[in-house]
């Protein structure tokens, strides 16, 4: 009887040790998976950092382009304004010639 009890106790201990070994293997695989996940996360964060730097550089380029375009538009506006005064002066001279023609010829 004692041999039978010792054998059952050994079987229980053996099954308990096997279940602990299985649990430890599960923990080990979970830790390994977490390591892989954190490695992937670190890679994604690095890529996002590069993307943020590229976006910042593009924003700087865009700002420079917008400022250049604004300068070009202001320059064009000044040319248009000076041309407008030229047209008004020409029309004024034409009106004076027409008045002189109407007054003296007619």
Image (spheres, helix red, strand yellow):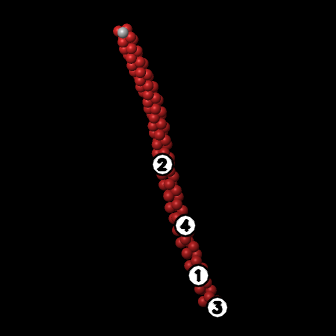
Q: Position of residue 12 (x, y in %)?
A: 39, 17
Residue under label 2, please give it. Answer: 59
- Of discs 4 and 1, which sits in the foreground? 4
Q: Are marks 4 and 3 in contact (CB under 8 Å)?
A: no
Q: CA distance from mark 3 to mark 1?
A: 15 Å
Residue 40 or residue 15, whichever sits in front: 15
- Of discs 3 and 2, which sits in the foreground? 2
Task: Please report whichever mark, 4 or 2, sits nearer to the chain's N-terminal start.
Answer: 2
Residue under label 1, please give it. Answer: 95
Q: CA distance from mark 3 to mark 2?
A: 68 Å
SS state under label 1: helix
Q: Position of residue 2 (x, y in %)?
A: 35, 9
Asked if one can make out residue 17 in the rendered structure from this viewpoint, the answer is no
- Of discs 2 and 1, which sits in the foreground? 2
Task: Please report whichever mark, 4 or 3, sits nearer to the chain's N-terminal start.
Answer: 4
**What residue lies at 50% left-to-right and 61% top-to-bottom?**
74
Residue under label 3, please give it. Answer: 106
Q: CA distance from mark 4 to mark 3?
A: 37 Å
- The image quadrant where one finds the N terminus is top left
Task: Please report whichever mark, 3 or 2, sits nearer to the chain's N-terminal start.
Answer: 2
Residue 64 or residue 99, whichever sits in front: 64
Residue under label 4, please give it. Answer: 80
Label 4 crowding class (10 Å Cα cut-off): few <14, some 14-19, many 20+? few
SS state under label 4: helix
**What residue lies at 60% left-to-right and 82% top-to-bottom?**
97
SS state under label 3: loop
Q: Position of residue 26 (x, y in %)?
A: 44, 25
């Amino acid at each position: 009887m004692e041999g039978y009890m010792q054998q059952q106790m050994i079987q229980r201990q053996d099954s308990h040790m096997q279940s602990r070994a299985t649990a430890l293997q599960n923990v080990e695989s979970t830790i390994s998976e977490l390591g892989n996940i954190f490695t992937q996360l670190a890679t994604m964060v690095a890529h996002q950092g590069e993307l943020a730097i590229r976006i910042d550089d593009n924003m700087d380029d865009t700002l420079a382009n917008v400022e250049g375009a604004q300068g070009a538009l202001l320059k064009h506006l000044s040319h248009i304004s000076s041309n407008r005064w030229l047209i008004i002066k020409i029309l004024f001279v034409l009106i004076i010639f027409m008045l002189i023609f109407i007054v003296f010829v007619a």
